[in-house]
Amino acid sequence: MYFDGACPVCAREIALYQRAAAAEQIQWQDLSPPQAPAPDLGRAEALARLHVRDDAGRLHVGADAFLLLWRSLPSWRRRTRWLDHASGRALLRVAYAVFLRLRPLWRRGA
């Protein structure tokens, strides 16, 4: 899981997930220090929105990445059932798009 630790809102949310049961099974990569996350993912692209890599190596981006992350954490899995269908994913995508427009207001120097 690739995340922007320089975004205070993002960092707090990731810290919440990291305290959840089964979080130790996830590889958490903070991209706020300058580094390339992976050969197939540039740093600027990764910082622009949430990216999660599944067990098969596929990247999931944005709202789809959140759903994959939440499904992998037992305490969050129950909360995602109502989002894990077409209209729920559409709602989540809209909410995430709004967040992305507001996020630059919170992000510290990159």
Image (cartoon, rainbow, N blue to C red):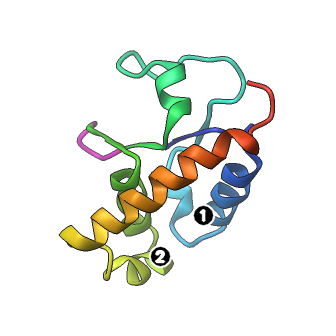
Q: Going by the picture, which residue comes out furthest to the left?
A: 86
Q: Nearer the viewer, residue 34 or 86?
A: 86
Secondary structure type for disc 2: helix
User: Which residue in the protein does label 1 denote?
Assistant: 17
Amino acid type, mark 1: Tyr
Amino acid type, mark 2: Trp
Q: Is residue 47 left or right of residue 94?
A: right
What is the magenta segment's predominant secondary structure?
loop
Secondary structure type for disc 1: helix
Q: Is residue 84 visible?
A: no
- Residue 102 sits inside the magenta stretch: no
Q: Is residue 82 left or right of residue 99?
A: left
Of labels 1 and 2, earlier in sequence is 1
Give the extent of the magenta segment: 53-57
Residue at the (29%, 65%) spot, across then down: 89
Residue 59 image point, x, y percent: 31, 38
Label at residue 76: 2
Residue 12 image point, x, y percent: 73, 58
Residue at the (67%, 65%) spot, across then down: 16
Residue 102 image point, x, y percent: 64, 48
Q: How many marks?
A: 2
